[in-house]
Image (cartoon, rainbow, N blue to C red):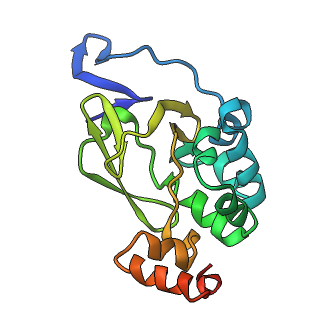
Amino acid sequence: IVTVNCARLLKADHHATNGVVHVIDKVISTTTNSIQQVIETEESLETLRAAVAASDLNSLLESEGQYTLLAPTNEAFEKIPRETLNRILGDPEALRDLLNHHILKSAMCAEAIIAGLTMETLEGTTLDVGCSGEELTLNGKAIIANKDVLATNGVVHFVNELLIPDSAKTLFELAQESEVSKSTDFFRQAGLSSHLT
């Protein structure tokens, strides 16, 4: 699938006497903002703006390149426990891993994403980016609230859930989501859960 500024290429290579015509399915508008400027101007990305500033990722998101930012909205940050959020925001390494887990290494418009596509993030982890009908999905969940916000250095999709990588979780959080959740209960009962957090 070929896209031009996120418009799908419908028919290519119509030769004319004075050139060539490619037919696309949208009107292409002018793009002047970098990904960083998109973050700075969108009210729904206020928490993300603060997180990017704290992790010193501003320069990357305004530099030349072709990235996809899966931008967590304020609503996405509000869904996780305040204690977890404060811990990540207070830990520069965990915060950087969290944000890099939301940045793909290439620009991916919604039109070009097909079911079962695995994309590598800047953190070095992978995300399953797919589609279900008309909806985009991440790791099988339709959590994309707004898609194809174009920037000069890539594209932004707004997501309404936070994608927390393992490297930004405590041992306790990891254990709760795995096959050793019963062991976690034993640690809690023995008064040792603080070691895991």
Q: Quadrant of the C terminus?
A: bottom right
Nearest to the observer: residue 77 or residue 173:
173
Asked whether 129 or 1 is in front, the reply is 129
Quadrant for residue 125, please give it. bottom left
Question: What quarter of the picture does the N terminus occupy?
Answer: top left
Residue 32, image quadrant:
top right
Left/right of residue 48 with respect to residue 71 in the rendered view = right
**Residue 18 placement (x, y as % from top left):** 32, 12
In the foreground, 126 or 169: 169
Residue that appears at 24% across and 50% down: 116
**Residue drawn at x 64%, y 64% as measured from the top left:** 96
Task: List x then y, in percent, for residue 190.
Answer: 56, 89
Asked if residue 180 is positioned above or below residue 54 in the image, the reply reads: below
Answer with left or right where residue 196 lies relative to residue 90.
left
Q: Residue at x 29, y 25 (%)?
A: 9
The reply to whether residue 83 is in sight is yes
Q: Residue at x 72, y 30 (%)?
A: 41
Can residue 42 be seen in this snapshot? no
Count of numbered badges drawn on the protein: 0
Q: Position of residue 68 (x, y in %)?
A: 49, 46
Q: Nearer the viewer, residue 19 or 153?
A: 153
Compared with 171, 144 (above or below) is above
How far across and down, in percent of the image, does residue 79 sit?
A: 58, 47
Image quarter of residue 14? top left
Q: Is residue 165 above or below residue 33?
A: below
Check the image and name the residue furthest to the front: 189
Residue closest to the far top: 17
